[in-house]
Image: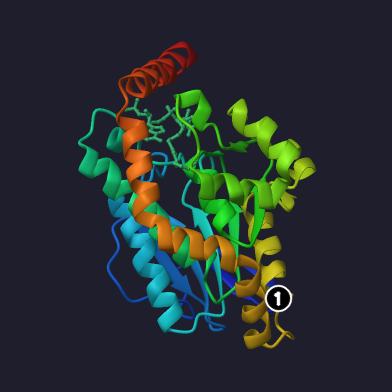
Amino acid sequence: MSSYVYKTTRRGVLLAKTVSYQVRLCSGNFRHLEVLKDENNVAIVTMKRAPVNSLNTELLTEISSVLTDLEETKCSGMILTSFSDKVFCSGLDIYEIFKSKPSAIGTSFSTLLEVFIKLYGSTFPTVAAITGHAPAGGCVLGLFCEYRIMVQNFKIGLNEDQLGFNAPSPIVKLMINTIGHRNAELALTSGRLFTTSQALQVGLVDEIAKDRTEAFEKADGFLRRFEMIPPLARNFTKQSMRRALLQDVTINREKYTEGFVSMISLHEVQQSIAAYLDNLKNKKRNAH
Ligand SMILES: CCCC/C=C\CC(=O)SCCNC(=O)CCNC(=O)[C@H](O)C(C)(C)COP(=O)(O)OP(=O)(O)OC[C@H]1O[C@@H](n2cnc3c(N)ncnc32)[C@H](O)[C@@H]1OP(=O)(O)O
């Protein structure tokens, strides 16, 4: 078997071309995720929905159920990453929000908010090893984590305005909390995608890695910071800092979902998405 297994150890992270007997698979049968746990109960959750990890409802539901499993099994930390060395996650599956029924758009967005609540509010430390581009919902997944390490020479950001709609308010708040009001306003209104080094400068990511292996070493380093910190204290502090936003999303999930569906269903927005998709296809054609 030739799949790679990333094994965290006290001395760092080994990238081993092996099926490691010390790493066990998390329970659950996932189509788009690989979930490994090491002997310290650190989980490595790898999204593997080819080609670009677009977040359809199925993938979002799988992420949500892994998060429940990790809480139940008292996971001591989680690294979220991608199978791809080019794309971390391309955001919501555009085909679930383009020319789709309101109910499908609603389910997709509501499931994203479910992941928001569980990942942003997790009791265990979380880190995103961003091994490639992370536009829109891809950036959002990273923002749900506590720390972001991004491989150099990719792009990340909330480019929703380029698609013709705006990022909903809890996502805007998350961005403001991360990069500050001024930077967030400038970035969001222009749908800006930052290069890895620009993202570091503005605080959208916390560290840069030269490649996947270094990203994992740094992710492991982040998790090891908490080895000597009592988990209960750490979690109380985390929850107290995140409570306001978590409560807002939990209480208003339905309202935010309805708002998102209404916005996406607008004729002008659907036209913008169509133009964006054309542009994406043309770029691809011109590249060949
Ligand atoms: C703010 C939060 C509120 C709502 C949350 C989120 C909203 C969203 O997330 S909307 C989605 C926004 N996403 C994007 O704008 C990303 C668009 N994609 C890209 O920029 C590039 O594809 C990417 C840089 C990710 C990768 O580039 P390449 O490696 O060059 O691949 P291709 O562009 O050739 O793409 C391959 C294949 O995948 C399809 N694709 C890409 N992104 C998506 C997507 N988000 N959903 C569905 N499908 C996607 C793309 O069309 C290609 O398909 P084929 O042409 O059939 O091969």
Counting from the top left corner in percent of width and height, residue 168 is at: 48, 42
Q: Quadrant of residue 219?
A: bottom right
What residue do we see at 28% from left, 53% from top? 58
Q: Secondary structure at mark 1?
A: helix
In the image, 158 versus 228, the foreground residue is 158
Q: Position of residue 86 (x, y in %)?
A: 53, 39
Q: Is residue 210 visible?
A: no
Camera-side residue: 7 or 241?
241
Task: Residue 38 in the image: state x and y as whole percent.
Answer: 52, 78
Query: With 183 as the anchor, is 50 left or right in this view?
Result: left
Disc 1 residue type?
Arg
- Please give the residue where the numbered disc 1 appears in the rendered image: 224
Q: In the displayed structure, does residue 151 sit left or right of residue 247?
A: right
Please determine whether, in this image, residue 79 is positioned above or below residue 94: below
Q: Which residue is rendered at x = 58% and y = 57% of the image?
A: 128
The quarter in which the C terminus is drawn is top left
**Residue 23 screen position, x and y as percent:** 47, 77
Answer with the quadrant where ligand 1 appears in the image.
top left
* Count of numbered tags: 1
Q: Residues within 10 Å of mark 1 (few under 14, many from 20)?
A: some
